[in-house]
Image (cartoon, grey):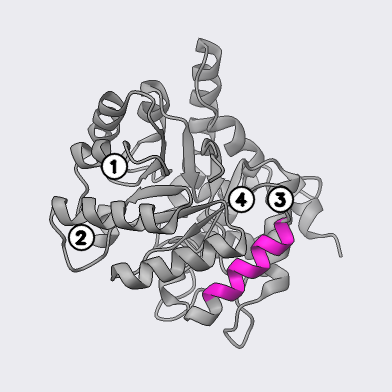
Amino acid sequence: MRRISVEGSWPGIVTPFTEHDSVNVESLKRVIEFHIENGSDGLLILGSTGEAIMLSQDERQRVIDAAVDFVNGRTLVMCGISAVTTRETLENARYAKNAGVDCGLLVQPAYIVPTQDALYKYYKEVAEEADFPIVIYHNPTRTGVSIQAETVAKLANIDNIVALKEAGPNPYQIVRVIELTRGKFNVLCCDCPTYALILPTLAAGGKGTSNVTGSIVPKEFKELSKPWKTFKDALRTRELYFKLLPLMRLMYAETNPVPLKAALNIIGAKVGRPRKPLTELSENYLPALKLTMKRLGILNDESYQSEFFSKK
């Protein structure tokens, strides 16, 4: 099994849809190329941002095949493999591995509220049977159950569990995981501004972010997400963090990926609307989103976003 290092900026990639609500593969390829050209360290497909839970199995496989074929080894690809049952999760993992995905992102099963022992066995079984790198995704807000730091630390002893993506509202969880694991695997965090995880994660020795906002500003998020080695790194991150904080707030103003799809459409990415029952971004937030993007220079004709998506 090939070992990989999950660090830096890993933006969640949206699943674009056509006007008839089918997966738009050509638009997906343009979004992927945008990230490769602008330096994202890896790409996350079929995560929360990719509306994976609302895709059919055929659609999931189509996204995986299109992404892996188009990337063609130019960057790393992480793929959401989660399902409610272990059997379905393993089916997803095997497909992703055989398609050439570099690692799988595995969130705790939603709604059924497993015990810590059940969660440990779930991750352990999937990791051992899938036999490719696995990233733990801790998202208690969406799933209704938390993975305790001590459980994460036990899982870190499994060879092919290589990283944690933390998306919970408790910075101490990250500090505790890093304390217990001590370099056994990498810790990344989400960019939800009300959770305020980025600065404490990097200060404690975390290795980057798996983010939403980086899908609009990949160059900036690559710089913001670099692990800290010197005090200059901390100063760089702090400056970028507060510069981008208004945009981060808007990316989480409504359910992800509703604001992100709106922002991508504004810059000409043509990713379509979110799949129902999600709705398009409320008119209450649209003026603020456009104004914030304008203030950051994203809407300028000479911005790298405008130049990329204006190309035919």
Disc 2 vs disc 1: which is toward the camera?
1
What are the residue bounds of the magenta stretch?
60-71
Q: Is residue 67 magenta?
A: yes
Q: Is residue 191 visible?
A: yes
Q: Name which quarter of the figure residue 87 lies in.
A: bottom left
Name the kind of residue labelled 4 in the image: Ile
Q: Is residue 251 magenta?
A: no
Along the line of sight, the residue nearer the viewer: 53 or 281: 53
- The disc placed on residue 144 is 2
Query: Residue beneath label 4, please?
Result: 216
Residue 140 lies left or right of residue 186; in this view the side is left
Query: Residue beneath label 1, please?
Result: 155
Q: Tell me how far mark 1 sits from mark 3, CA to CA.
A: 28 Å
Q: Name which quarter of the figure residue 41 lies in.
A: top right
Name the kind of residue labelled 2 in the image: Gly
Name the kind of residue labelled 3 in the image: Gly
Residue 14 lies left or right of residue 167; in this view the side is right
Residue in the image at 36% along x and 73% along y: 88
